[in-house]
Image (tube, rainbow, N blue to C red):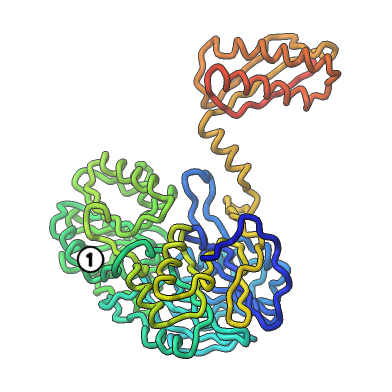
Amino acid sequence: MPSPARKLTAPPRLAKRGMRITPLGGLGEVGRNMTVFEHAGKLMIVDCGVLFPEEHQPGIDVILPDFTSIRDRLDDIECIVLTHGHEDHIGGVPYLLKERPDIPLIGSELTLAFITAKLKEHRITPKTIQVEAGEHRKMGSFDLEFVAVNHSIPDALAVMIRTKAGSVLHTGDFKMDQFPLDNRITDLRAFARLGEEGVDLFLTDSTNAEVPGFTMSEQDLNPAIDRVFTTSPRRIIVSSFASHVHRIQQVLNAAHANGRKVAFVGRSMVRNMGIARDLGYLEIPKGLVVDFRKIQSMPDHKITLICTGSQGEPMAALARMANGDHQIQVGEGDTVLMASSLIPGNENAIYGIINKLTDLGANIVHKGNAKVHVSGHASAGELVYCYNIVRPKNVMPVHGESKHLHANAELARRTGVPENRIVVGQDGVTVDLIDGHAKISGKVEAGLVYVDGQTIGAATEDTLAERRLLSGGGVVTVVALIDPKTNQPTEPLEFLTKGFVHDARTFDGAETQVTKALARAKQDKIDDIGEIENIIVEAVSNYLRRIYRREPAVMAVVVDA
C-alpha cells in the first residue's frame, strides 16, 4: 500500500479540479488531531487538538500542530469543524484563534460549549455555528453534512465534505456501541446512504485497528464500577478525563445508589461537568454533588471525589495527591478508581502514580485489574463493517500511531479496497484527490510545536535535549582565572557542581587536560575568551565521559588574571 517516501518536497500548486488533504497532526501519534482541506483557493479545517508531553519532554505543557503551512493563508480559512469535545481535538483552537479570532467554529452543542468555556480563559469570544446530526451547512466551496457517531463523549459527529473535486467522509473518533448510555448510536444508515452516493476518500479512526472484534459496550462496565462502590470501606477517588461525561455519569449513578456524596476536584473538571449538567448531558440527582469544602467534613465511607489526572499529568490533582502536595491526603483504606485508558507514551507516568498511591495504602482499581474502562474507538470488526457498507474509492487511515494506521490500511485492503487506493500518510504529507484518485503529492512542515508556560514554539528539540542532559547528569561549572599572555590558569581551577556526584579527586585529571588544551590553543594563537571557554568545556566533558562515563552539562567561565 502506498506510503510516503522518506524525502518528499513541497507539493506543486493544486490542480483546479482537485482537493488537497493535509494532516498537520494525529498521524503517527495519538493526539493533536488536525486536518486541512483545500479546494478552489479556500481552506477548511477538521479539528485542532493538542498532544500531551511524554517523560522525555520535560517542562512542556502541551504540544500543538504546526500552523506554519497555513499561516500566510489564515484569511482563506472558511471554518474549523470540531468533531467532538476532547482535548486532543479542540485543545489547539485557542492558539489558532489568537492568530485569527474570527474563524467560525462549527460543532455540536456540547462541543461548542466546551470550547467556548476554554476560549473564555484565553479572552477570546468565538464565532460559533451549532449543528446537529443530519444537518447540512454550506461553507464557501465546501458543502458539509454531519452524521451522529458514538464515542466516549456525547454529541460526537462525523462529517461528509462535498466539493466539485469529490467527497470525503471523515469519521472523527467513533465506535459502534449498540447500547450507549445516551442511546445515541453511530448512524450506520447514514454511512450506508453516503456509500451509495459515493465516497471518494474515507478518513477513518485507526486507534483500535489492531484490536480484534468489537469494542465492549459502556453498559458492560456498570457491574465493576458498582462493585467498587459496594466494597470500598473509605473514600473513593475517581480520576478521569475532564470531558469524559459518560464515565462520570456511571460514577454518579453508582455513588447515588450507595449513599455517597460527590465532589468535583480541579478547575477543568468543575467547569466541564457544570456545562454538561446545564445542557442536560449529565443527569445529577438533587443533593448528590456538593462543594468540595463541605464534603471534607463527612464520614469517609460517604465520600466520592472525582478529579483529573488519569494520564499521569504532573500538575493534575491525582499526581499531586500521589506526591503528597494536595489538600486531599490519600491514606490507608482509600480506593482510587482510574477510569480512563492509557494513552501511548504515558504508561510510565501512570504506573509511577499507581505505585506511589499504593505505598500510601490506597487500593488502586484500573483497567489492568478490573473492567472499569472501555475504549471510545472502533475495533477491527467495526472498521471492517464500515468499509463494507461505505465502499469508499480511496482510504486514508487517521488518528493513531504508525502501527495503528498500517493495521487500519490492511483492514481496508482485506475488504477489497485496491492497494493503490490506500494512502498511509504522516503528519505534513499532502494528499491530492484528483479525478477520483487520492495520491501523495508532497510534504509541508508539520513539526511539534511546544507550549512552555507563556511561550509558544520557543522551546525546541535542542532545548529539550539540554533539559534531559541537566536532569540526567547534573551541571559542572568551571571557573578559570587565565593569564592572557600564556593562556594558562594563574590559580587552580574551581569546579562548581549541581546534581553531579563527585569526591575531592574527581576533577584532578580534568585540570591536567584543561592545561594541555590551553597550551595547544596558545600555540594556535587562540586568545578569544569565548573560544577558550569552549576549549575548557570540551576538555572537561571529554575527560568525564572517558574516565567516569558521565555526561553532565559543562559550562566554563573565564576571567582575565
Asked whether the viewer can see residue 37, the reply is yes
Local crowd size for mark 1, using a 10 Å CA cut-off: few (<14), some (14–19), many (≥20):
some
Question: Disc count in the image?
Answer: 1
Tell whether 533 sits left or right of 429.
Answer: right
Q: Residue at x 65, y 56 (%)?
A: 7
Is residue 476 or residue 453 the one in the foreground?
476
The local secondary structure at tag 1 comes to helix
Is residue 252 or residue 288 the one in the foreground?
252
Above or below residue 81? Residue 260 is above
Is residue 508 or residue 295 the one in the foreground?
508
Is residue 296 or residue 144 the one in the foreground?
144
Q: Residue at x 55, y 65 (%)?
A: 2
Residue 537 falls in image quadrant:
top right
Residue 256 falls in image quadrant:
bottom left
Percent coordinates x, y for residue 502 in the rendering:
51, 17
Which quarter of the figure is the C terminus placed in? top right
Percent coordinates x, y for residue 549 in the rendering:
53, 22
Badge 1 is on which residue? 221
Asked whether the viewer can see residue 120, the reply is no
Residue 342 falls in image quadrant:
bottom left
**Which amino acid, mark 1?**
Leu
Percent coordinates x, y for residue 111 in the rendering:
46, 75
Tell whether 503 sits left or right of 325.
Answer: right
Percent coordinates x, y for residue 235 in the rendering:
22, 53
Tell whether 441 sits left or right of 349.
Answer: right
Q: Residue at x 54, y 85 (%)?
A: 144
Q: Residue at x 57, y 87 (%)?
A: 143
Above or below residue 23? Residue 197 is below
